[in-house]
Amino acid sequence: MAHFMNPRNMGEIKDADGIGKVGNPACGDIMWLYIKVGRKNNKEIIKDIKFKTLGCAAAIATSSKITELAKGKTLEEAIKITRNDVADSLGGLPKIKIHCSVLAAEALNEAVYDYLKKNNLHIPEKIMDKHEKIRKELNEIEKKYKGVTDL
């Protein structure tokens, strides 16, 4: 409840290096995750991260939590954050709300994908496979809820 009542890192990074946009066709939740990438010890790290979420309390809480889990991590470490990491760090989620932790992890994957693509960097197969699945789901939402995914 703390992450719903007092979300961390909420907002938008206007000059984001990567943006992840994901949604769930069943419930209509939509998340945007913005990352700013920096360098530390010759590795790319998530220097700043923010989110905007249109969804329920669990969607907002998981969006907030993923930002805390990813901030300061290398890109490689960040994409290893799983839905279970998000849910467990919140003290668990009701089974009916687990999809929110999935969305948070997917939004981070998409933001990293976007950064790599924009900078003509190698996109690992694992990130590419997730991206293709996420794009299909987002297309379903955009068809079902025309205009809702545009902020």
Image (cartoon, helix red, strand yellow):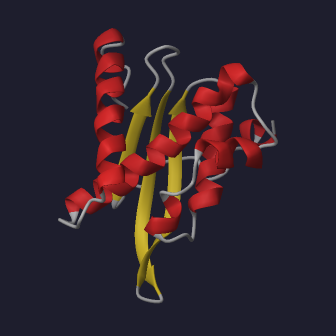
Hey, which residue is sitting farthest top in the picture? 144
Observer able to see residue 14: no
Up/down of 29 relative to 88, above or below: above
Q: Position of residue 59 (x, y in %)?
A: 61, 31
Q: Residue at x 44, y 28 (%)?
A: 23
**In-image side of 23 versus 136 (left or right):** right
- Front in this rendered view, residue 20 or 101: 101
Up/down of 146 relative to 15, above or below: above
Q: Quadrant of residue 4?
A: top right
Observer able to see residue 63: yes
- Front in this rendered view, residue 146 or 135: 135
Q: Position of residue 25 (x, y in %)?
A: 43, 17
Q: Position of residue 108 (x, y in %)?
A: 47, 50
- Front in this rendered view, residue 108 or 146: 108
Q: Residue at x 29, y 48 (%)?
A: 128
Hey, which residue is sitting farthest front in the picture? 125
Up/down of 75 relative to 146, above or below: below
Q: Quadrant of residue 122?
A: bottom left
Q: Position of residue 140 (x, y in %)?
A: 32, 17
Up/down of 47 relative to 42, above or below: above
Q: Residue at x 68, y 38 (%)?
A: 61
Q: Which quadrant does the N terminus fall into?
A: top right
Hey, which residue is sitting farthest left in the picture? 120
Q: Residue at x 67, y 49 (%)?
A: 85
Q: Quadrant of residue 141?
A: top left
